[in-house]
Image (cartoon, rainbow, N blue to C red):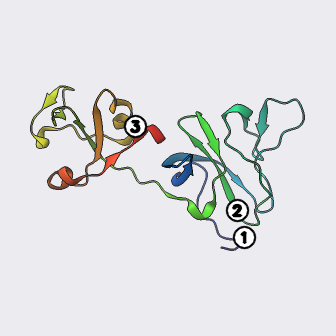
Amino acid sequence: MNGSEKLFQLGDMVEWTSQAAGRTKIKVGKIIAVIAPNETPFLMSAYQKSYKLPNGLEISYWKTNYGGGLPRNFESYVVEVGNGKAYYWPRVSGLRRHEEKSYILCHESDNTYMGINGLKCKKMADAKVMGFDEARKKSQGGWQAFEAIRIVMMKQGKKVDFSSY
């Protein structure tokens, strides 16, 4: 990649895979700052409790997962995860566009599905199909999220671990 390529824009939703402590997680977030080639994103002077991004946005030092690093010789991005829960400066080569998918919830104890009214239902066809954010919020208490590509394929769907988001 050369320095003139523009892969993403401010506001784009992106995802990447990270690894720590033997676990692999998929992180999803929104680009909140575009960092020019040969710049670092987080500028902080002594005794400050926040970083100031090149675009003027200030974020708490404690909410960044910035491990330092030298300026990159190509455009890079600061990504906000979880509505301000954390901020990252991920490797550009690992970023990809996040496409909204649909999910259904299946209860692990009795293999029932969450229906449109929020109650359990036995037929997959009666399951409520929901977006990422709603599925993440509701996938607790035994409910597991499965990617809903097509109703016919849902039984073979992939389990989604929302604890990494």
Number of numbered discs overlaid on the protein picture = 3
Q: Which secondary structure lies at badge 2?
A: loop
Q: Residue 134: give x, y in percent of width and height.
A: 35, 34
**How far is mark 1 from mark 3, CA to CA?**
34 Å
In the displayed image of the protein, which residue is found farthest to the front?
22
**How far is mark 2 from mark 1, CA to CA?**
6 Å
Left or right relative to 135: residue 6: right
Q: Which secondary structure lies at badge 3?
A: helix
Mark with earlier residue (1, 3): 1
Q: Which residue is mark 3?
A: 133
The residue under the point 52% across, 54% down is 17
Q: Which residue is mark 2?
A: 75
Whether residue 120 is visible: yes
**How far is mark 3 from mark 2, CA to CA?**
29 Å
In the displayed image of the protein, which residue is found farthest to the bottom?
2
Q: In the displayed structure, would residue 35 be above or below residue 7?
A: above
Q: Residue 138: give x, y in percent of width and height.
A: 33, 30
Q: Residue 88: give x, y in percent of width and height.
A: 64, 46
Q: Residues within 10 Å of mark 2 (few under 14, many from 20)?
A: many
Judge by depth and name the residue closer to the eye, 63 or 108: 108
Q: Amino acid at mark 3?
A: Asp
Judge by depth and name the residue closer to the eye, 121 or 102: 121
Q: Amino acid at mark 1?
A: Gly
Disc 2, disc 1: CB below 8 Å? yes
Mark with earlier residue (3, 2): 2
Q: Which residue is mark 1?
A: 3
Disc 1, disc 3: CB below 8 Å? no
The residue under the point 56% across, 46% down is 21
Q: Residue 52: give x, y in percent of width and height.
A: 78, 39
Q: Amino acid at mark 2?
A: Glu
